[in-house]
Structure formats: C-alpha cells, structure tokens
Image: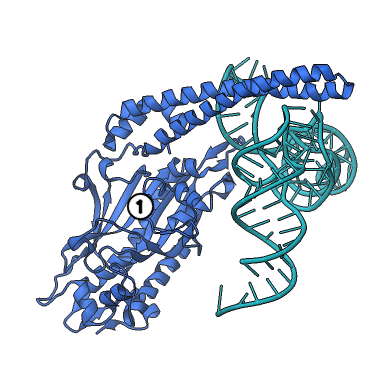
RNA sequence: GGAGACGUGUCCGAGUGGUUGAAGGAGCAAGCCUGGAAAGUUUGUAUACAGGAAACUGUAUCGCGAGUUCGAAUCUCGCCGUCUCCGCCA
C-alpha cells in the first residue's frame, strides 16, 4: 500500500498517478484518506495522553501503598476507574478510525512510474522491442493441443478424470520436457546470481496479505479450509514473504532469490480460446525471480531482470515481444511492468509468458521489509519480481513453432537436459 | 494424535504483581588507553505510532490474542510455535 509520506508530501503526484491507472475520483479518495488519518491521529493523541495520566496515577498508588496511605489510595482508585471508562471509549474510537483508514488505504493501488504510458487497456500497451523470427509453418501445422495428442505427451482428458479441467497430465517426453525447462530456467537464474529457494506452496493469510493477494484477490486462490492455508498462485508469495517483518542491512542489498514452484489459480470466469490447451491452467509450473533492492537501484535492476528474461527466450529461439504496460493494464501493486509475449505460430497469437515488475515500496510497506541506511535510519526497501519463466505457454509455443512433418524439434540448449532432440 | 516442559532484547540469561523497556554477561559501534593491536576502561546499542525545528517527550510491544487488577514479563483463558517421551509415517 501507499505510504503516508507519499500521500502527504506528494499528494498531487499520487492523484495524477491514480488517474493514470484509471481510478475514478482519485482526488476525493486521497482526500478521504488524509482526513481519516487526521482523525486517527487525533484519537491517538487523546488516548495516549489519557493513558499517560492513568499510568502516572497508578504509579503513585504503588508509592502510597508502601507508605500505608490507604485512604488516599482508595480515592485515587476511583479516580482512575473513571478515567479508564473514558479511555475505553477513546480506544474504540481509535480502533474504528484506524480500521476505517486501513480499509481506504487498501483500496488504493500503487501509482505508476512516470514513464508508464497512459491508456485504459491492453491496446494501449507500448511495444518496446520485438525479437526472434516468426516461423512459417507447413500446410498441415496444428495447434499445440492437437500436437500434444498426436505425440501423446500431454493428456488433458486424463487431467479432467483425476482432478478437473485445467489440470493436464504430462506424459513421457512431455513430462521430461517440463523437467528440462524447469532445470534450464533455474540454472540460468543461478548463473545470473540468484539463490534458489524451495518454499512451501501453501501459505497462511499473513503471507497472502503481505504480497497483496489478500484481501483483493481472495477468490482467485485455492483455499485449504481445514487448516486456513492458501495454495500459492505464484512463488512470489512465499519468496517475497521471507522478508516480511525483516530489517536488512544496506550492504545485504540487493537480495536475489529464485524458485520453482507449481502455481495454482482458480481463474473463475475464463472461457473459450483463452483457456484452450495450455493457454490457461489451474495448475502450472513457473520459475520466479525476486529481488529486494535499494530504492536508488531498483529501476536499473528492473532492466537487468528484463535482460535476463530476454536471454532465456533468445536461447530457446522463441519469437517474442516486450510490452511496457499502460496505466490501465497494470496490476494493482505494480509501479512499472514489462510483459513478455511469445508468438505461438499455429494459434497465431501472442501469449504472455512473463511479467516483470517493480513494486517500489508498495509491497514492502505491507510486508514491513526495510533496510538500515547509512544514517542508521530504517527505510522501506523496493521489491521486484518476474516470471523466468512460466512453462505452459512456453511449451505451447515450442510445440507449435518447432513442428515439422517429421516431429517436433527441441531447442539445442535443452538437449543435454532432455536427452532427446525431437518428439515424434 | 496423546502426555509433559518451555517461549524474555542481536545472542545467552535473570526476573512470579508496583519507577522493569526490562538485571547481568556476550556480541557489535564509538571514545579513551597503545607505536599499533590485544587486554583494560567509558559510553552507546529495538520497533512502531503520536507530539516537537530539534534535544527530547508520551504511548504500545517480554510468542500472538483476550481477560483479572488502580498497576501484568510476572495471575487466568484461548491460539501458535519449540523441545522431550509415546503413537503413526514418506
């Protein structure tokens, strides 16, 4: 969530930023928060002063007792009890005011970086770069879900039997390809200096709140009701929450972690060609990269991360483009997001395979992830993350783009990991 | 899952109702000392919110939450976690 420093000292910037994210009545919302904050401070002061008085009176009770002044003690006690009644109502006012302020604050998304283009939807995203060659397919080329069936490497119907739609079963070379891609991505991340983490894939509500999935996206996560745990929608959740309530030394920054996990998303309301085959699943595999950075370095780091993801796609020889998302298409928590899309030649569609974002202090403010600067002051760190990469659509594009009448060619970089060069 | 013990600051560790945000020690930082270092010595060493230009002051925090009390690290209840024994198990 936004910080009070942002809201108080850069009110105008915040309002303009919110407008860029197409938030209606941004000014009114910000003013309402500032008013709610004043209200909270007022009650806080009143309550603190009253408590200070009660504390000091209580202290004198102790002293008087030792001196045996019982009559005065009784008098003091009744006086304190009166004050305590007052305090009780002040406490509840304060609690309500804080709750109200929090509710308002949680509804405000992050404000976009100044370079973010204006726009309302995906059509206004800015194409930064296009790379690779879009292949010309042979006459009998098929979409990946048909190829998967032809070569018996992914079984969607079997997944329906075992679980339900959106839970495919990878078989034989299909399963090996998955494992090879995961290993490849992890190895590349390791070479880029990321520490590999194997986190839990069920998390508690505090973690869901920390990275912003809760309360806004409650319905999008699977929930293990008996224990109150959420199945993670991305490794970002556990890997970023490692730094919840942590104060780092400036010298420890940047922290670079990566991890492979399955990801679970309910994706309620999706339909049609968007969910065909591997295009959108309830369970999928992803390698995520996460950094906790010094505020002055975070945008350089964002570019590094974009470079890292690009290199993965280059090495897989997949055609892709990089988009800078416009204000209206960005996620709630992000200040600047680059999306990567690969071209899936048989479907003739661009498929999103990665999203790399700088959250600045939006997540760390919730997480209370801070560092000590040179003056020993605690400051909020910046958090960033990106998919590097999400598997299903990569697999879809690999299958479709690399198909020949004789079979599917595996990119050379994976040969050592798959142990085969073609699927036929 | 059953029985028992425990949960204090960066760490160790004292504290069973009243100037205890918390003894003592270690670590760390700065000053003194030294040719330099060690030793010695002095001082400092949490977080959040509020007030203040600042020095600083107030409030809260001894696993978390509620309660008893004029007053709780200390008493009561609930939850979470750790350890030991038993059971189960990859």
Can see residue A193? no
- Mark 1, Cα crowd under 10 Å, few <14 / some 14-19 / many 20+, is some
Query: Which picture quadrant has residue A391?
Result: bottom left
| Helix, strand or loop for disc 1 | helix
- The percent coordinates of residue B31 (x first, y second) are 79, 33
Residue at left offset 36%, top offset 62% = A389
Q: Nearer the viewer, residue A316 or A98?
A: A98
Residue at left offset 26%, top offset 45% = A329
User: Circle 1 marks a residue in which chain?
Assistant: A
- The percent coordinates of residue A20 (x first, y second) are 28, 35
Can you say whether B10 is above or below A376 in the image? below
Can you say whether A201 is above or below B72 in the image? below
Q: Nearer the viewer, residue A122 or B48?
A: B48
Colour cyan, chain? B
Query: Which picture quadrant has residue A88?
Result: top right
- The percent coordinates of residue A412 (x first, y second) are 32, 76
Can see residue A285? yes
Tell which residue pokes out farthest to the left in this image.
A139
Residue to which mark 1 is pinned: A219
Give the quarter of the figure containing the N terminus of chain A: top left
């Amino acid at each position: 969530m936004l910080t009070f420093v942002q809201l108080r000292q850069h009110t105008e910037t915040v309002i303009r930023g919110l407008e860029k994210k197409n938030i209606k009545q941004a000014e009114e919302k910000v003013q309402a928060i500032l008013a709610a904050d004043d209200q909270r401070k007022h009650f806080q002061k009143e309550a603190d002063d009253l408590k200070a008085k009660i504390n000091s009176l209580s202290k004198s009770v102790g002293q008087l007792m030792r001196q045996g002044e019982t009559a005065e003690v009784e008098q003091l006690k009744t006086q304190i009890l009166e004050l305590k009644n007052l305090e009780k109502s002040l406490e509840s006012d304060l609690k309500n005011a804080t709750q109200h302020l929090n509710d308002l604050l949680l509804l405000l998304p992050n404000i976009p970086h100044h370079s973010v283009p204006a726009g309302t939807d995906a059509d206004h995203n800015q194409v930064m770069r296009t790379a690779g060659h879009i292949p010309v397919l042979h006459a009998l080329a098929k979409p990946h879900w048909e190829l998967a069936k032809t070569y018996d490497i992914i079984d969607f119907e079997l997944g329906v039997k075992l679980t339900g739609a959106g839970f495919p079963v990878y078989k034989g070379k299909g399963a090996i390809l998955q494992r090879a891609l995961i290993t490849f991505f992890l190895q590349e991340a390791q070479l880029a200096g990321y520490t590999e983490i194997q986190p839990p894939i069920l998390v508690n509500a505090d973690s869901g709140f920390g990275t912003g999935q809760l309360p806004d996206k409650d319905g999008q996560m699977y929930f293990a009701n008996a224990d109150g745990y959420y199945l993670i929608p991305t490794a970002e959740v556990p890997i970023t929450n490692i730094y919840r309530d942590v104060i780092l030394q400036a010298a420890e920054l940047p922290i670079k972690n990566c991890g492979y996990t399955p990801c679970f998303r309910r994706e309620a309301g999706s339909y049609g060609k968007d969910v065909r085959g591997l295009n959108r699943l309830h369970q999928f595999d992803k390698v995520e990269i996460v950094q906790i950075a010094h505020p002055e370095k975070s945008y350089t780091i964002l570019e590094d991360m974009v470079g890292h993801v690009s290199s993965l796609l280059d090495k897989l020889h997949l055609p892709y483009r990089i988009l800078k998302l416009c204000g209206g298409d960005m996620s709630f928590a992000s200040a600047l997001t680059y999306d990567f899309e690969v071209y899936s030649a048989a479907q003739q569609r661009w498929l999103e395979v990665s999203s790399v974002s700088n959250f600045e202090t939006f997540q760390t403010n919730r997480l209370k992830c801070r560092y000590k600067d040179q003056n020993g002051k605690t400051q909020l760190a910046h958090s960033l993350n990106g998919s590097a990469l999400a598997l299903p659509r990569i697999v879809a594009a690999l299958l479709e783009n690399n198909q020949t009448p004789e079979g599917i060619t595996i990119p050379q970089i994976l040969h050592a990991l798959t142990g085969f060069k073609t699927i036929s």
